[in-house]
């Protein structure tokens, strides 16, 4: 019986090692895409010749929260709530049964029937509060929304996006079981690559005339060209 248990544990350990090794190699392959996504960010705003009020309000909200964060530190409970609700959302979207949810002052967890990389790492890349605010703003705009109220919304949306970005950067530096499961290096590469993709889509939802298709086309083209040159070199 003990031999069987040891054998099972060894198999699980070997599977984890294989998974982490595969993800490490895959993350190395994704790095050129990440660099392309960073370098091509200006493409999103090719149609803008000047700053619009919406961009100014949201940028002001983003920068003001950075200052607040530096002065007062992270709003822990708000981040835990966003983080755990994101686990719940992506578990639900993946069709995975949620067993239990706990959200406390300084910690939280979500227990699911099974776990995958999307469920585990999505909270670090998905700005739940920002998406919820944008959806609420779009619905409200259908009925009535003054220019003053619109400016306030964009300011708050900027604050929420800043909250997600800054808090995520802060918390990924702390021991995270979600990231440990898949390896820190691989997790960071996936998180920051997904974050750029989600951020671009979020910006496209926030502002009109954003060149989202052109942005992704150029980024993937530049990634393809990099690998083409690499293969030609060898």
Image (cartoon, grey):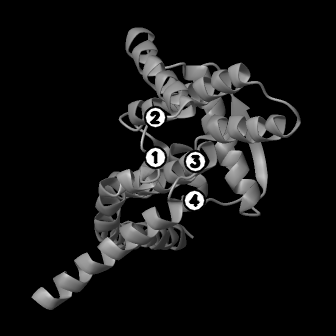
Q: Is residue 198 left or right of residue 97?
A: left
Residue 156 falls left or right of residue 64: right
Disc 3 to disc 2: CB gap under 8 Å: no
Q: Nearer the viewer, mark 1 or mark 4?
A: 1
Mark 3, Cα crowd under 10 Å, few <14 / some 14-19 / many 20+, is some
Residue toward you, 205 or 175? 205
**Label whose residue precedes the other's in the sequence (3 or 1):** 1
Q: Secondary structure at mark 1?
A: loop
Residue that badge 2 annotates: 51
- Horizontally, residue 55 falls left or right of residue 184, namely right
Dot 2 crowding, Cα within 10 Å, few <14, some 14–19, many 20+: few
Q: Do labels 2 and 4 touch, CB within 8 Å?
A: no
Q: Is residue 229 left or right of residue 177?
A: left
Name the residue rendered at 62%, 24% in the picture: 156
Judging by the rendered image, the residue that carries numbered circle 1 is 48
Instruction: Assess whether mark 1 and mark 2 are in contact (beta carbons under 8 angstroms).
Output: yes
Mark before the other along the chain sequence, 3 or 2: 2
Q: Secondary structure at mark 3?
A: helix
Residue at the disc numbered 4: 118
Residue 158 position within the rendered picture, expressed as x and y whole percent measured from the top left? 55, 29
**Quadrant placement of the N terminus:** bottom right
The Cα–Cα distance between marks 3 and 1, rounded to whole angstroms, is 17 Å
Can you tell which mark lies on residue 202? 3
Residue depicted at 51% across the width and 44% down the height? 124
Please give the name of the residue rendered at 38% of the width and 66% of the height, measured from the top-left corner: 20
Helix, strand or loop status at disc 2: loop
Indicate the secondary structure of the residue bearing disc 4.
helix
């Amino acid at each position: 019986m003990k031999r069987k248990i040891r054998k099972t544990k060894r198999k699980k350990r070997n599977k984890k090692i294989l998974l982490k090794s595969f993800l490490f190699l895959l993350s190395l392959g994704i790095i050129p895409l990440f660099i392309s996504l960073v370098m091509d960010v200006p493409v999103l705003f090719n149609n803008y010749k000047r700053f619009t009020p919406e961009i100014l309000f949201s940028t002001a909200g983003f920068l003001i929260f950075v200052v607040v964060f530096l002065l007062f530190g992270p709003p822990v409970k708000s981040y835990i709530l966003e983080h755990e609700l994101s686990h719940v959302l992506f578990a639900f979207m993946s069709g995975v049964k949620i067993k239990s949810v706990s959200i406390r002052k300084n910690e939280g967890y979500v227990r699911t029937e099974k776990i995958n990389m999307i469920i585990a790492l999505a909270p670090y890349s998905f700005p739940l509060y920002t998406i919820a605010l944008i959806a609420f703003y779009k619905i409200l705009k259908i009925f009535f929304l003054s220019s003053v109220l619109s400016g306030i919304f964009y300011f708050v949306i900027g604050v929420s996006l800043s909250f997600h970005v800054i808090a995520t950067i802060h918390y990924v530096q702390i021991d995270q079981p979600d990231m440990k499961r898949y390896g820190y290096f691989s997790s960071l590469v996936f998180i920051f690559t997904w974050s750029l993709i989600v951020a671009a889509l979020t910006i496209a939802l926030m502002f009109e005339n954003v060149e989202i298709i052109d942005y992704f086309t150029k980024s993937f083209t530049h990634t393809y060209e990099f690998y083409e040159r690499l293969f030609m070199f060898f």
